[in-house]
Image: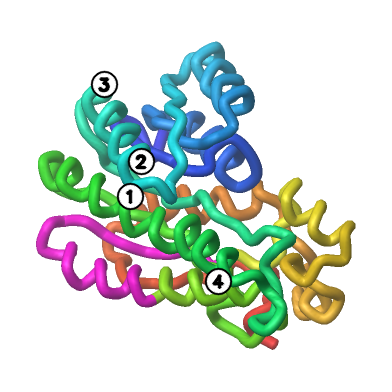
């Protein structure tokens, strides 16, 4: 049984990592997919592969930290597919410029907030009216275990992800009577290409050795997070809202 049959899902940051793994899984479960990213080559390639395999996907370019671009992308996809049932605010991440508070460039904080907090905020603002027209839906935000436990470095990213935790709970309260569920996934160290690059550089924006040791089951892969996103996107989670679920190999249990 396809758990997302008949559902229209939008995934931001869809061209790589967790977003890409989730897009493939959602497509296999019957979702019609709107893919948003700034990597045109990989985004178009992913949409092409999904369509070639019998699914339905459309890639639209947008920087989620730019409200006008994100609004245009969401409106374009909603108009083409006839609405929105699922919004997965997956786009985000720290950069090598993120650092300890006393060391990071001040403009990096603005970048971190724009990408990791404002982007999901704006995505929810633009998608919720379309979900209401469909009678409800599911919003999945991406937090981080850095927002759940004490970690060192990437203070801009950590601050933004803390905002995602509280935004998720606030929206869950506001959207319940609209039939819209709002939850968040808090990944641990997931070995995406971006994280691998940060680790190879020994940059504090990536997980250091101490953080890696906290992962009782080892570091994760994007394909281990995607099924959790599928759970939140599907009707299996129809009685779940306002929750922040660590998917972190046990790191937050230490």
Q: Can see residue 222?
A: yes
Up-down relation of residue 159 to residue 43 (above or below)? below
Does 18 lie within the magenta span? Answer: no
Mark 4 and mark 2: span between their CA atoms?
A: 27 Å
Q: Nearer the viewer, mark 1 or mark 3?
A: 1
Q: Nearer the viewer, mark 1 or mark 2?
A: 2
Q: Position of residue 108 (x, y in %)?
A: 59, 64
Which residue is identified by label 1? 123
Q: Is residue 8 left or right of residue 188?
A: left
Up-down relation of residue 134 to residue 148 (above or below)? above
Q: Nearer the viewer, residue 121 or 26?
A: 121
Do callouts 1 and 3 mark residues in contact (Cβ within 8 Å)? no
Q: Which residues are magenta?
A: 166-186
Which residue is identified by label 2? 70
Residue for point 33% across, 59% down: 121
Do callouts 2 and 3 mark residues in contact (Cβ within 8 Å)? no
Q: Which corner quadrant holds the C terminus? A: bottom right
């Amino acid at each position: 049984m396809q758990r997302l049959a008949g559902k229209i899902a939008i995934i931001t940051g869809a061209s790589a990592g967790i977003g890409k793994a989730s897009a493939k899984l959602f497509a296999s479960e019957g979702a019609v997919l709107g893919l948003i990213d700034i990597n045109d080559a990989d985004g178009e390639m992913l949409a092409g592969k999904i369509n070639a395999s019998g699914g339905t996907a459309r890639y639209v370019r947008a920087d989620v930290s730019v409200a006008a671009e994100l609004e245009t992308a969401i409106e374009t996809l909603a108009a083409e597919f006839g609405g929105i049932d699922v919004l997965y605010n997956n786009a985000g991440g720290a950069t090598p410029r993120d650092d300890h508070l006393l060391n990071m460039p001040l403009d990096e904080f603005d970048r971190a907030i724009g990408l990791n907090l404002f982007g999901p905020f704006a995505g929810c603002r633009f998608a919720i009216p379309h979900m209401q027209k469909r009678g409800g839906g599911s919003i999945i935000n991406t937090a981080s275990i850095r927002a759940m436990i004490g970690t060192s470095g990437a203070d801009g990213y950590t601050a933004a992800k803390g905002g995602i935790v509280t935004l998720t709970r606030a929206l869950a309260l506001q959207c319940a009577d609209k039939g819209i569920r709002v939850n968040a996934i808090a990944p641990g160290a997931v070995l995406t290409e971006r994280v691998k690059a940060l680790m190879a550089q020994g940059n504090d924006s990536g997980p250091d050795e101490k953080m890696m040791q906290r992962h009782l089951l080892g570091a994760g892969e994007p394909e281990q997070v995607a099924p959790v996103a599928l759970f939140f996107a599907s009707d299996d989670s129809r009685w779940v809202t306002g929750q922040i679920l660590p998917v972190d190999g046990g790191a937050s249990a230490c």
